[in-house]
Image: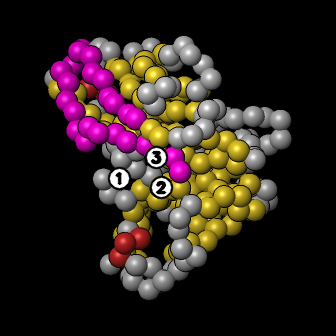
C-alpha cells in the first residue's frame, strides 16, 4: 500500500502564476482534504472533497480551488499566486462512506511551494 | 469556532527520560476527537495517539500516553523513555465530524528535541 502520494514534492513559481498540486489517496479511501502549512505554523484546513464535491471549506479565498476525480484522486489549484502562498501543502485521505463512521486520516508528505 | 493552543514552542529532553507536551483547546461541542501528530523532517504527519471525547479513560500507545481533562479542555502528551527518533514537531489537533464531513484544527506545534 503506497499510502497517500503527492506530486510534485517541490515547486517554485513566480507571483501571478497558477499552480496545480496533485494527491492520490490511500487505497480504499474516498475523501481527500487539503491543508496549508506555513513555515513554523500548524496546518490550516483549505477544503475537503467527497463524491467529487467540495463538502467543506476553510477560510481561504476563491483563488484556491480543487477537484476530485472518479478514482478519488484530487487536485488543488491556486491562481494568481502571492508570496504569502509559499507553504507546505498537505493532502489527507480517509474513508467517509455511509456507515463507515470515522476512520483515521492519513497524510501525504506534502508539496513544498515557493513563490518568488 | 474551535481553537487549539500549544504554549510550548520548543522543548528538549534527555534520552530515556520523560517529557510532557501541553495542549489546550476551546469548543462548545461535547463529542469530538483529539489527536497528537508527529511531523519529522520528512514532513509527513504521523498519528501518535487519538482520544475520543466520550471516553473517560486516557489513551495509551506504548511509550505515549495522554492526560485528557475534558472539563478543563486540556490534552497533554506524555512520552516515556524518550528516544532520539522522537525528535520532531508535535501537533495537537481537534476534530469534529458533522453531516458527513470533518476537518482537523491544529495547534502551532511544539518542537521536541531528544538529547543523547
* Of the pair B6 and B38, the residue shown nearer to us: B6
What residue lies at 79% left-to-right and 56% top-to-bottom? A51
The residue pinned by badge 1 equals A41
The kind of secondary structure element at disc 1 is loop
Residue A30 x %, y %: 73, 48
Residue B50 x %, y %: 53, 27
Residue A105 is drawn in which quadrant? top right
The residue segment tinted magenta is B1-24
The residue pinned by badge 3 equals B3
Number of the front mark, 3 or 2: 3
What residue lies at 59% left-to-right and 48% top-to-bottom? B103
Give yes or no for residue B20 being in the magenta stretch: yes
Quadrant in which the N terminus of chain A is drawn: top right
The chain holding disc 1 is A
The residue pinned by badge 2 equals A44
Q: CA distance from mark 3 to mark 2?
A: 12 Å
Position above or below: B13 against A17: above
Query: Circles 2 and 1: CB distance less than 8 Å?
Result: yes
* Of the pair B103 and B111, the residue shown nearer to us: B103
* Of the pair A45 and A79, the residue shown nearer to us: A45
Amino acid at each position: 500500500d503506497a499510502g497517500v502520494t503527492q506530486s510534485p514534492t517541490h515547486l517554485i513559481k513566480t507571483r501571478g502564476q497558477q499552480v496545480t498540486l496533485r494527491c492520490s489517496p490511500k487505497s480504499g479511501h474516498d475523501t481527500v482534504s487539503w491543508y496549508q502549512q506555513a513555515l513554523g505554523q500548524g496546518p490550516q484546513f483549505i477544503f475537503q472533497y467527497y463524491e467529487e464535491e467540495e463538502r467543506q471549506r476553510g477560510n481561504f479565498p476563491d483563488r484556491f480551488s480543487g477537484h476530485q476525480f472518479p478514482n478519488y484522486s484530487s487536485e488543488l489549484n491556486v491562481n494568481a499566486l502571492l508570496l504569502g502562498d509559499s507553504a507546505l501543502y498537505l493532502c489527507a485521505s480517509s474513508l467517509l462512506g455511509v456507515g463507515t463512521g470515522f476512520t483515521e486520516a492519513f497524510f501525504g508528505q506534502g508539496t513544498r511551494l515557493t513563490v518568488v | 469556532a474551535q481553537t487549539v493552543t500549544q504554549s510550548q514552542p520548543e522543548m528538549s529532553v534527555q534520552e530515556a527520560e520523560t517529557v510532557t507536551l501541553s495542549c489546550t483547546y476551546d469548543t462548545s461541542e461535547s463529542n469530538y476527537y483529539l489527536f497528537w501528530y508527529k511531523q519529522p523532517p520528512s514532513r509527513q504527519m504521523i498519528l501518535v495517539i487519538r482520544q475520543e471525547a466520550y471516553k473517560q479513560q486516557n489513551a495509551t500507545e506504548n511509550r505515549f500516553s495522554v492526560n485528557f481533562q475534558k472539563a478543563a479542555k486540556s490534552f497533554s502528551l506524555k512520552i516515556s523513555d524518550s528516544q532520539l527518533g522522537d525528535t520532531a514537531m508535535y501537533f495537537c489537533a481537534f476534530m469534529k465530524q458533522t453531516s458527513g464531513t470533518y476537518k482537523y484544527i491544529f495547534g502551532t506545534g511544539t518542537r521536541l528535541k531528544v538529547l543523547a
